[in-house]
Image (cartoon, coloured by chain):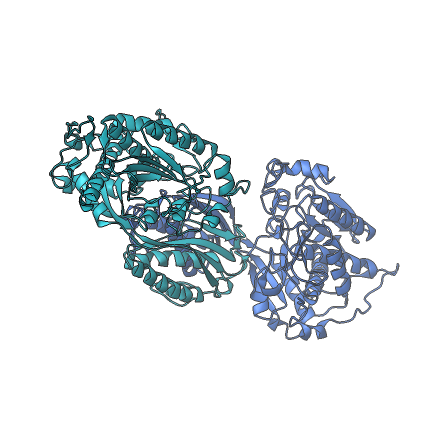
Chain colours: A cyan, B blue
Amino acid sequence: MSRTGCAISALSRNVRPVRSSVLDVQGRRFATGIVGNTSSVELKVSQDRLMADIHATCEWGKGPRWGTGKHETGMSRLALSDADKECRDWFVHTTKSLGCEVTVDAMGNTFAVRPGRRRGFPPTCAGSHLDTQPTGGRYDGILGVCAGLEMLRVLHEQKIETHFPVGVVNWTNEEGARFPISMVASGVWAGVIPLEKAHNLREVGGNGRTMKQELDRIGYLGEKDAHHQAIPLGAHFELHIEQGPRLQAGNRRIGVVHGVQAYRWHTITVQGQDCHTGTTDFANRSDALLTTARLILHSHRLAVKYDALASTGIIRAIPGSTNTVPGWVQFSLDIRATKDDVLLDLEKHLKSDFDEIIRGNPVNGLNDGPEVMGRPCTIEWTLDAPSRATRFDDGCIDCVRQSAAHLLGTEYKEYIQEMISGAGHDSVFTSRRCPTSMIFVPCLDGLSHNPAEYCAPNDCANGAQVLMDSVLRFDRLRQVNSGE
Amino acid sequence: MSRTGCAISALSRNVRPVRSSVLDVQGRRFATGIVGNTSSVELKVSQDRLMADIHATCEWGKGPRWGTGKHETGMSRLALSDADKECRDWFVHTTKSLGCEVTVDAMGNTFAVRPGRRRGFPPTCAGSHLDTQPTGGRYDGILGVCAGLEMLRVLHEQKIETHFPVGVVNWTNEEGARFPISMVASGVWAGVIPLEKAHNLREVGGNGRTMKQELDRIGYLGEKDAHHQAIPLGAHFELHIEQGPRLQAGNRRIGVVHGVQAYRWHTITVQGQDCHTGTTDFANRSDALLTTARLILHSHRLAVKYDALASTGIIRAIPGSTNTVPGWVQFSLDIRATKDDVLLDLEKHLKSDFDEIIRGNPVNGLNDGPEVMGRPCTIEWTLDAPSRATRFDDGCIDCVRQSAAHLLGTEYKEYIQEMISGAGHDSVFTSRRCPTSMIFVPCLDGLSHNPAEYCAPNDCANGAQVLMDSVLRFDRLRQVNSGE
């Protein structure tokens, strides 16, 4: 199965050759003059080198095969596993060889920083993560880190000197798949999640080892404080696959990401009573699963009304026998909206409607007409993970948009998508402490968290190009703003 | 927790003392003259002895405790387990001590037959099962066998001689909990289920031992053919707890059971596509779980319309993660109706409506108005267990009704419930080969297949009394019909 046939050929005309830029007396080029509509520096990432990095590193933690092609295997590189250690070691070794200074903090976050002309200032960074889902793909997180590395390779090769330092960050356990809080290490860095709580997280389904034990075991329990004050960043740009279908559907190449929508994850328990499916008429049932079907459907209907999202991914019905009506059902409810107040309004409305539905009262076409109400169930909500809406930095967003425009040419507006991220990323936490934004590239059919997750090489390269340009543009902005 | 406070005191006036009946020259009483409105034989079961048998046998395979009382533990006596063997050995030993001849067939079905005046004729039997659910109670099946045994005790103690033989049957693996076909051994006996298929059934979740291996291991692989022609029955009466709430709700003491409703068990698989809950808008989803919620709700609505039942007891959503929309859901659908043609009509209607629903077409208030359709799912139905409607024998039903009337007195109509069994029982299969009917007694809140399943001692005794009287009435009927 080959997936190289994406409709991206129209863009190749926009990829221009490197041309020489200003040279200083030591023969080093300065990355200057790229603020505004024209660029005097034309640095080009290497698609082949980028893809080689992605695929070489994906040998560590290789997952299940989904196609017959050489690279058609998924990833299973859980955070702080042996495979993760090998990949981290490569990252440290490679970035050092490109002239970076590497710092590991107490959460294993790894900061590879390339000096600029001005020393001692926080770096403008690209960042993402090298850990994956247990049945993940080759692009989620990995693309962002490898693209950052490709930026370092270009700067090194072309002997570019930036004004301020630039760098690449590998954030630990972004997925939350092994240690069950996602984005936990950037959360600690941002001062939002306590270090001790993170260190004491126990791995899911394993031998119960803690995050701290595993950091120590693989040699990534750094001495530096995992804190934005100890390791400040000048800015954070994150390239990521969209993990959704919008870019592909609209034939857009670059997503200019303005922020991340708010979400709230709940676990909802519906308590009824087990009974025999054959001997209990509807009026005498307290059917937790039929009630849950109504609740799930209603959550969808109300989310539509609020222009929000509601999704159930987990459902368990006990006791789980064909001829027993389940007396106990638990399900997840993930609600999301671009604005915090809309999300809270939706949640309030859901709670009040759910209360009516479980009591058998009619709500918008449920529990009326041809249904038999039976005996009421009870309901309990548990809030597992609230996340407020994130608005990225306008300056960073502008850098991304201008870089995309530069790549995509005069008709760039047809090829970019101004958008909000549906999923959380480390950039949610960095944006609390430094100017941040994100760049999205299409992934096939929006498929992600799946071995067959796929981002075409040209799209990977487009993203890496916009990432590098954004970092360099932001470096220039900082220089201008500092009056130097 | 004590459950002795049920509203049964009104009935005690109906329990009359034993009075003498006709004696023959050897001093044996004949069970005669009980056809019609009056009875010249007044035999009374012993409630205390019956309960002592139930509770003593429930030491074999004792399950989890649900209350503090002496007998407030459930049962976990899986078919052909060591506990089942101990209980079977007791059954064989006890019935032999009461003058019975015991035959074990190739399915482990155990027939304890007490001779009548006329030898060589098929016995009129009471029958049920001694196996239980893994988290079952003390009454489901056990009551029927122990009540049959109590009948043997009374006949033995009072030296009653019946015209034809009478007996008690313990059917193997009625629950289908260990070997996954319920009523499998009565099904083999009836010639409906092939012996080889039954013998090769492998235990659920264990070491994969077959039914034949386990029959052999515990010494109950009998030499006699498991077939109604090899071991014919004259009639089969089964006392059982209702396993539903109707008798309790109507303050009825005895259910006169006319038959068993038809049912068809399906496994339904809905295939959509996994996607991220945060990054995929409703229009781009193929949400197998939201679709399933619509299907479950619609199955309920349509069952109401058909005066039938529809229930989902099992549901699985893959991959099962809060932030992934499930692309695959499988659920059970158990539909039941008193008439075969109604059930088949309902099923046909469900299939056609489900096809519309998964395609996103509006069906009776689903998929319209405030919903977003997304991309269609596909659906697959698998029929696991069809069971046609069973109509019991009118003569047997009459015997039960008259016996209940005799017990309950002149106002008996207020205390009996003419009804259909919602659940399947061994009597479904015996009714294919001999006159059959059932007697139901109330169980608290209709709770069954649960450690806390409860039938009040008076109700157990009422049922046993009606069971014994029904067997004796039927014996007399056979005598009359034979012209002897």
Task: Measuring from the top left, give residue B99's x and y in whole percent.
Answer: 82, 51
Q: How many marks?
A: 0
Task: Measuring from the top left, give residue A349's x and y in whole percent.
Answer: 35, 64
From this view, report whether residue B426 is shown above or below residue B253: above
Residue lying at the far top of the rendered structure: A70
Screen quadrant of the N terminus of chain B? bottom right
* The quadrant where residue B330 appears: top left
Task: Evaluate whether residue A69 shows in this view.
Answer: yes
From this view, report whether residue B447 is shown above or below residue A311: below
Task: Measuring from the top left, give residue B187's x and y in whole percent.
Answer: 61, 45
Q: Which residue occupies the foreground of this view, B405 or A207?
A: A207
* The quadrant where residue A413 appears: top left
Query: Does residue B110 appear left or right of residue A37 in this picture?
Result: right
From this view, report whether residue A80 is shown above or below residue B450: above
Q: Which residue occupies the foreground of this view, A64 or A298?
A: A64
Task: Measuring from the top left, give residue B153's x and y in whole percent.
Answer: 79, 58
Screen quadrant of the C terminus of chain B? bottom right
Residue lying at the far right of the rendered structure: B26
Task: Evaluate whether residue B161 shows in this view.
Answer: no
Q: Which residue occupies the foreground of this view, B231 or B294?
A: B294
Q: Which residue occupies the foreground of this view, A361 or B173?
A: A361
Query: Does residue A424 appear left or right of residue A280 in this picture?
Result: left
